[in-house]
Image (cartoon, rainbow, N blue to C red):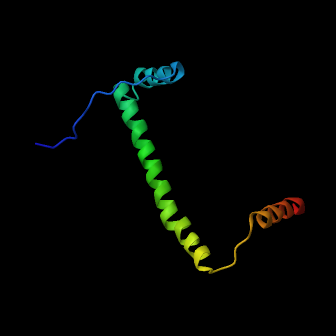
Amino acid sequence: MVATQAERDYRVKVKADDAEMVERKVASGEYATANDVFNDGLQALRDREQSLDQWLQETVAPICGDIVAGRGTFMTPDEVYESIASELSAS
């Protein structure tokens, strides 16, 4: 026997255009039920949050650590803006 997660009933209100989208997804056969549409949407949200967390940990945190430790050369926001403006005017 395979263990399954406990399920709970949960009532939500959605905008009319969102409800129509759910109905279209089910009517097209892409999803069997409205519940499946919502579960897929929640999984996409979990995936996006996981990707953001990974990016923050692997990319942003090390750079912040370098800034705090005084390692490297970094640009101020004004310098970034000036650099971008210069690149755009040169092209």
Q: Position of residue 31 (x, y in %)?
A: 38, 29
Determine the residue located farthest toward the right in the rendered image: 89
Q: Position of residue 40 (x, y in %)?
A: 39, 37
Please name whichever residue, 10 or 90, is drawn nearer the observer in this view of the structure.
10
Which residue is depicted at the point 47% across and 48% down?
Answer: 48
Please name whichever residue, 33 or 56, is drawn nearer the observer in this view of the structure.
56
Which residue is depicted at the point 42% across and 20% down?
Answer: 27
Total numbered badges shown on the rendered structure: 0
Which residue is depicted at the point 79% across and 61% down?
Answer: 81
Q: Is residue 40 above or below residue 82?
A: above
Point out the image quarter for the N terminus. top left
Q: Is residue 7 above or below residue 61?
A: above
Question: In the drawing, does residue 30 fall left or right of residue 77?
Answer: left
Q: Position of residue 88 (x, y in %)?
A: 84, 59
Point out the image quarter for the C terminus. bottom right
Determine the residue located farthest toward the left in the rendered image: 1
Which residue is depicted at the point 73% across and 70% down?
Answer: 75
Q: Is residue 56 above or below residue 37?
A: below
Q: Where on the picture, by quarter, is residue 2?
A: top left
Q: Position of residue 20 (x, y in %)?
A: 49, 20
Please name whichever residue, 63 or 90, is drawn nearer the observer in this view of the structure.
63
Q: Is residue 70 above or below residue 32?
A: below
Question: In the drawing, does residue 20 fall left or right of residue 89?
Answer: left
